Amino acid sequence: MQQKILLTECTDETGLIAKVSATCFEFGLNIIRQDEFASEDNRFFMRTVLEGDFSKNHESKFLRCVSAKLPDDAVVRLKDKGTLPRIAVLVTKEAHCLGDLLIKSYSGSLHAEIVMVAGNYPDLGDLVAKFNIPYHVVSHDGISRDEQEERMMKVIDEYDVDYIILAKYMRILSPKMVAHYPLGKLINIHHSFLPAFIGAKPYKQAYDRGVKIIGATAHFVTDNLDEGPIIQQDVIKVNHRYSAEDMAKAGRDVERIVLVRALNKVFDNKVFIHGNKTIVF
């Protein structure tokens, strides 16, 4: 028996769950788990884990039948459960997020295959080499941002990846590079509890403001700096004894945890993008 994940999004109306469930029954598919949510602006989201026969023709017919019973604007997708997405990781010099991703991918607790790492400095190449993963240096020295990004996109696109993870990649992406990839493919970890302290040096900003908590935010990348749909956040407590450097040191642990939690949610097809928000099951 195969397991797949049915993702449904459409205008909300009475009977949607019953219609999808009945279609699953008609095709002999067993519902293992189902999560749903109706938003205040009348949108319906559902994630259904199914088990059964998913031969090619059977799968296509099933999707057509589900769509036919739903509102005209319905988007229905069927995803393989257990298939590891291919990811590229972009870095600069900080190792904590990258190192955590490499270890968790190696141990199987990150539900993805890291197929390449690229950075604008060579500093993390030796770390990546320990995991037998290609590391590419795409330097920004002596060239324009546009040229550096063209080179970076060329390297990334050679690997046919499903997601690109900005794991402390300290370069602001241009609108051109963001537009090169569909919304949802670029994921960033920001060292702040957004929307507070957007941009550079958030721990210095937090220290100057005298905050009592610091945090991290994983979000999808859009043209608006650090304002894309939020996937996961967390915080820790700090106090007046913490310097900006102490806050940054403590914040690295939160960044690691938040990034992996967010990625596993995305890789397990538990995240819907809805405007500038997310629905996370």
Image (spheres, rainbow, N blue to C red):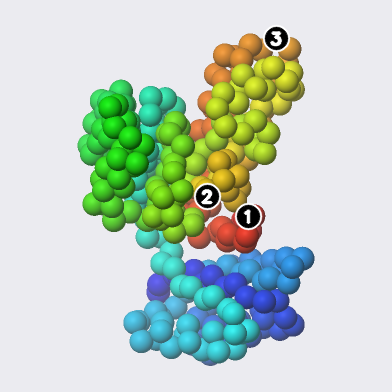
- Residue at the spot 67% in from the left edge and 76% down from the top edge: 11
Reading the chain from its start, which is encountered first: label 1 or label 2? 2
Task: Return the x and y of residue 231 as percentages of the image width and height.
Answer: 59, 48
Q: Is residue 275 left or right of 259 when viewed as pictured?
A: right
Looking at the image, residue 141 sits to the left or right of residue 189; the answer is left
Q: Is residue 143 left or right of residue 280?
A: left
Q: Quadrant of the C terminus?
A: bottom right
Residue 149, given in percent of the width and then of the height, sits at: 34, 42
Q: Residue at x 41, y 82 (%)?
A: 59
Point out the tag, 3 or 1, that comes first from the N-terminus. 3
Q: Which residue in the structure is indicated by mark 3?
A: 241
Contact between marks 3 and 1 (CB within 8 A): the answer is: no
Circle 3: residue type: Arg
Quadrant of the image occupied by residue 140: top left
Q: Is residue 3 above or below residue 280?
A: below
Q: Compared to 6, does 131 lie above or below? A: above
Give 223 or 260, whichever is nearer the viewer.
223
Q: Quadrant of residue 253?
A: top right
Q: Amino acid at mark 2?
A: Thr
Under circle 1, the secondary element is loop
Q: Residue at x 28, y 52 (%)?
A: 157
Q: Amino acid at mark 1?
A: Asn
Looking at the rendered structure, the secondary structure element under dot 3 is loop
What residue is shown with label 2?
222
Please determine whether, in this image, residue 200 is positioned above or below residue 110: above
Q: Which mark is residue 276?
A: 1
Q: Residue furthest right?
A: 40
